[in-house]
């Protein structure tokens, strides 16, 4: 990993972030803590969580934030970490019900501060948007929280380009700050829209890509490795085996399969792994992208951290995207 400045901010972050969606909930605390210890031990400092992570377990508790809070306090690590969390997600027990009223934004932030045992968040995201709510009210609320010192920067996740432009215009007009970053699904595969929508997520579209190209706003990319699609799609049981259901439902389509073939060819030509190329693809974009990785064990984490050192040139990127002759 290398250190970099998150563009438009004073935050110095490692160029690969640790996603914690499964920590403390989808696997046990020992595995979760081993992953955290390894990431920090390898020089990582950018940790991404959310108030909703872990609420899918019985009890509806923010298990990821709570585990992170205990871990940071035990090791006295708060000042060594750039901590990102997200609030205002749709309620777990009421999918589709939006929660971006000022009191809901503030309430989720206050809850996250308690869970994480800290008095400020470095980068605070709105997990989802409510297109029916006035964007000015949202920007005013976030600026207020920043002035209070509870957040250093604020950002958005899963927003459309038109809503981000609307937020930017309001902030300019009223001399306020706007979003510092945008977290969205972004990887080398072509997502299946129905599956992404069913997961209450969003992915990089042409319009959103153009927005980031024009503004230079950084992207933090979740599902950055396409859930291992470019490795797993070559497995004999990929199309039928239940254990491949997630990457298959999200990314199995003609365009993704064609890209997988080009990845395989470029791996041989460049002596690279598929994992290296999936991360290098994100680093090669015309705006800053910080991949978020969500390893399930220390071995996967180390493999991703090693793979993050690979870079590709414009010619290689063009080959991956367009199948032009290499």
Image (cartoon, helix red, strand yellow):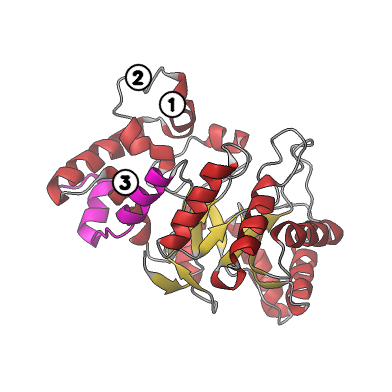
Query: Which residue is tagged 1?
Result: 244
Q: Which residue lies furthest to the top in this view?
A: 240
Q: In this view, does 50 lie to the left or right of 134?
A: left
Query: Which residue sits furthest bottom?
Result: 175
Displayed quadrant of residue 145 = bottom right
In space, the residues marked 3 and 2 are separated at their CA atoms by 20 Å
3D distance between C-alphas at marks 1 and 2: 8 Å
Q: Residue at x 59, y 36 (%)?
A: 26
Residue 279: mark: none
Q: Nearer the viewer, residue 77 or 246?
A: 77
Q: Write the residue at 55% across / 77% down.
A: 9
| Residue at image coords 38%, 65% | 286
Q: Residue tagged by mark 2? A: 237
Q: In this orientation, does residue 204 appear? A: no
Relative horizontal placement of residue 276, taking residue 253 as reference (left or right): left
Which badge, 3 or 2, is on the more N-terminal residue?
A: 2
Q: Mark 3 points at which residue?
A: 275
| CA distance separating discs 1 and 3 | 17 Å
Q: Does the image show residue 299?
A: yes
């Amino acid at each position: 990993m290398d250190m970099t400045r998150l563009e438009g901010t004073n935050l110095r972050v490692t160029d690969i972030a640790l996603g914690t969606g499964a920590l403390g909930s989808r696997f046990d605390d020992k595995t979760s803590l081993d992953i955290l210890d390894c990431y920090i031990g390898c020089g990582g400092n950018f940790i991404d969580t959310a108030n909703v992570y872990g609420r899918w377990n019985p009890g509806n508790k923010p298990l990821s934030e709570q585990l992170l809070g205990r871990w940071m306090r035990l090791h006295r690590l708060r000042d060594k970490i750039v901590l990102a969390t997200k609030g205002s997600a749709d309620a777990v027990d009421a999918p589709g019900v939006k929660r971006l009223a000022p009191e809901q934004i503030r309430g989720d932030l206050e809850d996250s501060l308690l869970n994480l045992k800290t008095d400020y968040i470095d980068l605070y995201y709105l997990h989802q948007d409510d297109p029916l709510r006035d964007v000015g009210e949202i920007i005013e609320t976030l600026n207020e929280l920043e002035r209070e010192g509870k957040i250093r920067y604020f950002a958005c996740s899963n927003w459309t380009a038109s809503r981000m432009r609307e937020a930017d215009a309001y902030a300019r007009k009223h001399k306020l700050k706007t979003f510092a970053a945008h977290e969205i699904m972004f990887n080398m595969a072509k997502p299946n829209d129905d599956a992404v929508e069913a997961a209450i997520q969003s992915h990089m579209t042409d319009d959103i890509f153009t927005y980031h190209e024009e503004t230079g706003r950084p992207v933090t990319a979740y599902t950055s490795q396409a859930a291992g699609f470019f490795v797993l799609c070559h497995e004999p049981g990929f199309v039928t085996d239940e254990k491949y259901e997630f990457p298959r439902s999200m990314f199995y389509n003609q365009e993704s399969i064609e890209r997988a073939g080009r990845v395989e060819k470029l791996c041989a030509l460049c002596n690279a792994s598929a994992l290296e190329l999936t991360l290098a693809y994100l680093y090669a974009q015309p705006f800053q992208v910080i991949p978020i990785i969500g390893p399930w064990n220390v071995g996967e984490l180390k493999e991703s951290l090693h793979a993050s050192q690979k870079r590709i040139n414009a010619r290689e990127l063009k080959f991956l995207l367009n199948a032009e002759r290499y």
